Each structure stands twice: as C-alpha cells, then as structure tokens.
Image (cartoon, grey):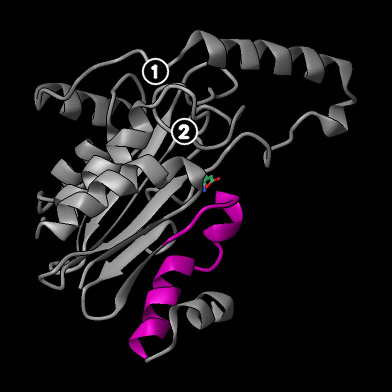
C-alpha cells in the first residue's frame, strides 16, 4: 500500500510523478521531495517557490519543512531568499542533530555551503502583481490596507510508501505583502505539518497566524493515533 495527498490543484503534476515513484517501491522521502520541487519550479504558482509573491519590500521570502515519520527527524527553513528548492534544503537539515531549523541569512549561508542551487525567485510577473497591489493600497483607506488572506496557498503533502514509512513536507512564499521576517505555520513542526509512521501524517494550509494557535497538524495526527478516521480527525482538530 502507498499513497500521497496534497493541498491545492497546483500539486497535481508533482504528486502524479511522486505516485509513479511510490508505485515502483520508491521512498516516501524521495517522492515527497520531488513532488514539492515540481511545484516550487513552476513559475506560474504565485504562492510557492519561483514566481511566489514577495513581501512588503519586494523580496520573495520562503518557508519550507520536511519530516520523516519513521525517525521523527525534522528539518525546516524560514524566510530564506534566492534558493530554488527550499524543500530540499529542509530535507537536508532533517539529517542534522542540531541546527535543523534555520532562518533567513543563516539558512542561506547553510544552503550556499551545501551547494544548493541559487536562483532569483522574483519573476517579472510577481513584480507586476506587487506594483499593482501598491497602487491599490495607496488608493485605499489605511484600515483596509492589509489584506493578509489574499495571495497565498502553501503546498503541503503527506506521503506513505510501501515499506510503511510516512513523510510530510511543505513549501510556501507565505503571505503576499507580509512583513519582512514574518514566518507562518509551514516551517513550524506540529502546526504546518507532522508525520508519525505509526499514526499518520498531516499538513495545513490557510492563515498561518490562525493555524499556529492550535498545533493543528500534530493534533490531527494524535487523533488518528487514537483510531480516528482522517476526515473526522481533521474536523475535530
Ligand atoms: N499557511 C501559509 C502561511 O501562513 C499560507 C497558506 O497556506 O495559504 O504562510
């Protein structure tokens, strides 16, 4: 038995390829990483990787995480700029005993040292969205300026391979027009993702500030561990 589930339409191509790997006996870590990379690389998704919408200062700051449900090893990066595949950096960090969640310049330094591909993630299309929003904002009343709920969507996945191993992973450019340094739920263990091969795996999408109030992904996995059906666990959590 194997399976893979993900947030949003943008993940279809990635999980289709990941499913091929799993069908051939592939590893849940490899399948989920490759599926998320596919979404990160696609230039027209405005909320993940290349082409993601920028923060207030017109910089694309990305959050990503990876968790191995056999070992409970976790790696994550937050507010990282100028690297093509944050999920791969997160997975690499999951092998570290210490320093496995790195932010901003620290994450970039690590990624550079480890030879990860550098890339300017801000596309012309994303710049155009930014300029349009700036114009709209200057035309609006101060109270309406911040619309944090528009222009985001994390890719989050849960994966099971034939050996019974589960993984969870996320990748996002977070909220469009967020403050520099803002970190959402996606790189935070238990909030944006969780995987325990004995119980299940979960990942979240939605407004990070709300998702972090309840350690929602951990709670879903915990309830599944008590025997709850996944749908019921999500609704209860
Ligand atoms: N959870 C993400 C964040 O708050 C955004 C999203 O999933 O739509 O950064």
Are the residues flagged by discs 1 and 2 in contact, CB closer than 8 Å?
yes
Q: CA distance from mark 1 to mark 2?
A: 10 Å
Q: Which residue is mark 1?
A: 121
Q: Quadrant of residue 42?
A: top left
Q: Residue at x 37, y 76 (%)?
A: 221
Q: Is residue 204 magenta?
A: yes
In which quadrant of the rendered image does the N terminus lie? bottom left
Q: Is residue 85 above or below residue 191?
A: above
Secondary element at tag 2: loop
Q: What is the span of residues highlighted in magenta in the rendered image?
A: 203-226
Q: Residue at x 31, y 74 (%)?
A: 200
The tally of labels here is 2
Front residue of this view, candidates 50 and 133: 50
Which circle marks residue 173 in the picture? 2
Work out whether residue 89 can be spotted. yes
Question: Residue 143: image x %, image y %?
Answer: 86, 33
Q: Quadrant of residue 175?
A: top right
Q: Residue at x 15, y 73 (%)?
A: 164
Front residue of this view, candidates 13 and 72: 13
Q: Is residue 202 above or below residue 205?
A: below
Q: Is mark 2 within 8 Å of ligand 1?
A: no
Which circle marks residue 188 in the picture? none
> Earlier along the polypeptide chain: callout 1 or callout 2?
1
In which quadrant of the rendered image does the C terminus lie? bottom right
Q: Is residue 24 magenta?
A: no
């Amino acid at each position: 038995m194997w399976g893979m589930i993900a947030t949003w339409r943008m993940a279809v191509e990635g999980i289709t390829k990941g499913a091929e790997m799993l069908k051939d006996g592939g590893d849940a870590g490899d399948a989920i990483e490759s599926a998320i990379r596919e979404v990160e690389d696609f230039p027209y998704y405005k909320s993940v990787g290349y082409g993601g919408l920028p923060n207030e200062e017109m910089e694309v700051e990305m959050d990503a995480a990876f968790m191995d449900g056999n070992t409970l090893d976790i790696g994550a990066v937050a507010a990282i700029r100028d690297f093509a595949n944050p999920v791969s950096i997160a997975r690499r960090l999951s092998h570290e005993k210490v320093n496995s969640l790195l932010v901003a310049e620290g994450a970039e330094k690590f990624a550079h040292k480890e030879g990860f591909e550098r890339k300017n993630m801000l596309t012309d299309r994303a710049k155009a969205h930014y300029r349009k929003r700036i114009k709209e904002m200057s035309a609006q009343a101060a109270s309406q300026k911040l619309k944090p709920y528009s222009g985001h969507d994390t890719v989050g996945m849960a994966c099971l391979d034939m050996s019974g191993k589960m993984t969870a992973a996320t990748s996002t450019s977070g909220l469009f027009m967020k403050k520099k340094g803002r970190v959402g739920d996606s790189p935070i263990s238990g909030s944006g993702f969780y995987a325990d091969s004995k119980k299940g795996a979960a990942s979240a999408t939605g407004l990070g500030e709300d998702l972090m109030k309840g350690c929602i992904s951990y709670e879903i996995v915990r309830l599944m561990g008590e025997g709850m059906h996944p749908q019921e666990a999500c609704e209860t959590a």
